């Protein structure tokens, strides 16, 4: 299920009429400041009422003020039922995948219910067909402060009868064998194979198996971690699509902008030998590679040493040493005798860990202080970082549960533990816990862009607190080619084309569909929104951006509540317009700047 947009030029052949999305009815009352108004008329966001302040019932008062609600809670159950009732009234398309006499609850499965700081409640629903999950398709119902459904994000396509219920020729083991043949390597997690209904790139629906195979251990050099997803036709065995959901901060090709140098970055020198050790608690006395002097929250162990375990943030922030071995084999605690980290007398192995730990702490604080969310899952999820992954590993990645950092090779990259890289990779976890943007096509480009945007937000946030941190619009510049002195970067949000790989305008998307390269479209839209400026390709200018904080709130709200796994760039425009409307009003300057920014990058 996606936010529909009729005006977007399709990237695939137009599907047959049996699979054409049916859009949910739309009404368009004029919005007011902080009112839940709808998307533009081509959208499937269907507003039904204005949001006004009301007194909370006793039941509402007992629920968490903001954040995820337990699906079994009375508050969540009430929101789910209201959403199902609204769906039943608004569309008959879903009912085609339901047994005769069954309700709409058989066509969708509740995934999450979240209440936001504006008093709205959002119910995310996975679509099912004849009892089988429809891969990547969701609806999100939005309830106002009064508990009434104010709109729906998503569109529904008619799925032919029988695709979920009729027998298929292949078994799950058959599909797994086909995927393993393509994977051509060992796996280090139990493989999964699930029967699904899948809409192919030709627009037609198929009975299929979704197979996932993972390899993250024993990585060497530039070997890429893989969490491969395969969609295999359950009758013909055709590989309908495959993609790696584990991105990393990889470099898809050699970048323009400087010859790789050598050495390991030392932005802030370690204290000279023999310097007196300052007190260990409550001091900004820890020396990082990239962020100057920082203050780390740690834990004192029974033997009197200290470890990089922070119990003051959510369910914890922990940094471990992977010992240059397999990521999940035997990571060990990183300890220090006096809780002054990064001293010249400390083990050099601990220095990258200082940055990883600081980066995770700043990311947690940024998500909570700026975005208003308690860690990735909204419930204080523990952030675990593993440093020293493999040998000469020029990458960093989120593996679905933890962060993993390579040390670099000392030439093309130093330790990949900079603030923006930490924020980028941890943000992949935030995307997984919210919109679940699929890591291919336009949704994959958006997935990468959201990580770049949040990574830049973490760097910006830390710069407000730490004078040694310099905020800019580059990605990974402190770790990338550390010795050449050119300040070149992995990506450039102000001018994505500067890397010689990325595109900055949707008209060039067909030329660059790889997700790191296509991320430049949304990256530049965010830059123009927050900062103002011109898009190089279109020449269109956005004057006077709305600032980082507002821009970050808009994009993060869109990710959390208005994007779904298959969101396209055009749908992301609508999602951010709606997020800005919620936050600042339908006729606000902020909404206009969101529209101008997407227009400048060719997304209408």
Image: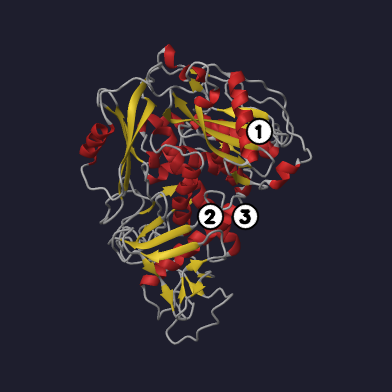
For marks 2 and 1, the one nearer the N-term is: 1
For marks 3 and 1, the one nearer the N-term is: 1
Disc 3 to disc 2, C-alpha distance: 11 Å
Q: Nearer the viewer, mark 2 or mark 1?
A: 1
Q: Is residue 602 visible?
A: no
The residue beneath circle 3 is: 369
Q: Is residue 117 left or right of residue 429?
A: right
Disc 2 to disc 1, C-alpha distance: 30 Å
Categorize mark 3 by other alpha carbons within 10 Å: few (<14), some (14-19), many (20+). few
Is 65 or 18 nearer to us in this picture? 65
Q: Is residue 529 left or right of residue 252?
A: right
Q: Where is 316 relative to 529, above or below?
A: below
Q: Where is 521 relative to 307, above or below?
A: above
Q: Residue at x 61, y 27 (%)?
A: 39
Residue 328 image point, x, y percent: 33, 58
Q: Which mark is residue 458?
A: 2
């Amino acid at each position: 299920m996606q936010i529909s947009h009729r005006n977007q030029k399709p990237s695939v052949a137009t599907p047959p009429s049996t699979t054409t999305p049916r859009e949910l009815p739309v009404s368009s009352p004029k919005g007011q400041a902080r009112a839940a108004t709808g998307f533009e008329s081509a959208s499937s966001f269907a507003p039904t009422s204005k949001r006004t302040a009301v007194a909370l019932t006793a039941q509402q008062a007992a629920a968490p003020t903001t954040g995820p609600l337990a699906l079994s809670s009375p508050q969540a159950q009430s929101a789910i039922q209201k959403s199902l009732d609204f769906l039943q009234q608004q569309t008959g398309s879903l009912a085609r995948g339901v047994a005769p006499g069954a309700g709409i609850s058989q066509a969708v499965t509740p995934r999450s219910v979240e209440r936001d700081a504006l008093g709205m409640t959002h119910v995310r629903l996975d679509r099912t067909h004849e009892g089988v999950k429809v891969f990547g398709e969701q609806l999100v119902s939005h309830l106002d402060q009064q508990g009434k459904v104010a709109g729906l994000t998503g569109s529904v396509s008619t799925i032919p009868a029988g695709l979920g219920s009729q027998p298929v020729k292949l078994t799950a083991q058959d599909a797994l064998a086909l995927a393993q043949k393509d994977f051509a390597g060992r796996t280090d997690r139990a493989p999964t194979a699930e029967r699904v209904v899948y809409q192919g790139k030709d627009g037609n629906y198929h009975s299929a198996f979704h197979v996932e195979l993972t390899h993250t251990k024993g990585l060497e050099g530039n070997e890429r971690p893989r969490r491969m997803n395969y969609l295999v036709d359950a009758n013909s065995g055709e590989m309908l699509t495959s993609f790696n959901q584990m991105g990393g901060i990889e470099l898809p090709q050699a970048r323009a902008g400087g010859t790789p140098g050598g050495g390991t970055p030392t932005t802030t020198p370690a204290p000279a030998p023999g310097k007196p050790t300052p007190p260990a608690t409550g001091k900004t006395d820890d020396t990082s590679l990239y962020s100057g002097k920082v203050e780390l929250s740690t834990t004192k162990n029974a033997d009197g040493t200290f470890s990089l375990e922070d119990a003051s943030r959510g369910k914890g922030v922990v940094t471990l040493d992977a010992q240059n071995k397999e990521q999940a084999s035997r990571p060990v605690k990183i300890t220090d005798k006096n809780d002054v980290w990064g001293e010249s007398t400390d083990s050099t192995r601990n220095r990258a860990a200082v940055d990883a730990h600081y980066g995770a702490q700043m990311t947690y604080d940024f998500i909570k202080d700026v975005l208003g969310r308690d860690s990735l899952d909204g419930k204080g999820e523990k952030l675990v970082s593993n440093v020293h992954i493999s040998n000469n590993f020029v990458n960093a990645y989120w593996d679905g549960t933890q962060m993993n950092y390579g040390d670099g090779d000392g030439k093309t990259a130093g330790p990949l533990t900079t603030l923006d890289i930490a924020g980028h990779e941890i943000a992949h976890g935030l995307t997984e816990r919210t919109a679940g943007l699929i890591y291919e096509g336009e949704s994959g480009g958006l997935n990468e862009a959201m990580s770049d945007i949040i990574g830049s937000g973490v760097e910006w946030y830390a710069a407000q607190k730490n004078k040694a941190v310099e905020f800019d619009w580059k990605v990974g510049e402190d770790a990338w080619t550390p010795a050449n002195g050119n300040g070149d970067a992995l990506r450039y949000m102000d001018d994505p084309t500067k890397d010689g790989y990325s595109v900055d305008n949707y008209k060039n998307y067909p030329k660059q569909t790889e997700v790191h390269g296509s991320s430049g479209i949304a990256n530049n839209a965010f830059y123009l929104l927050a900062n103002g400026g011109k898009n190089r390709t279109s020449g269109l200018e956005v004057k006077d951006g709305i600032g980082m904080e507002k821009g970050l709130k808009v994009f993060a709200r869109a990710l959390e509540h208005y994007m779904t796994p298959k969101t396209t760039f055009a749908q992301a425009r609508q999602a951010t317009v709606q997020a800005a409307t919620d936050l600042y009003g339908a006729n606000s300057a902020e909404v206009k700047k969101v529209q101008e920014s997407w227009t400048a990058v060719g997304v209408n």
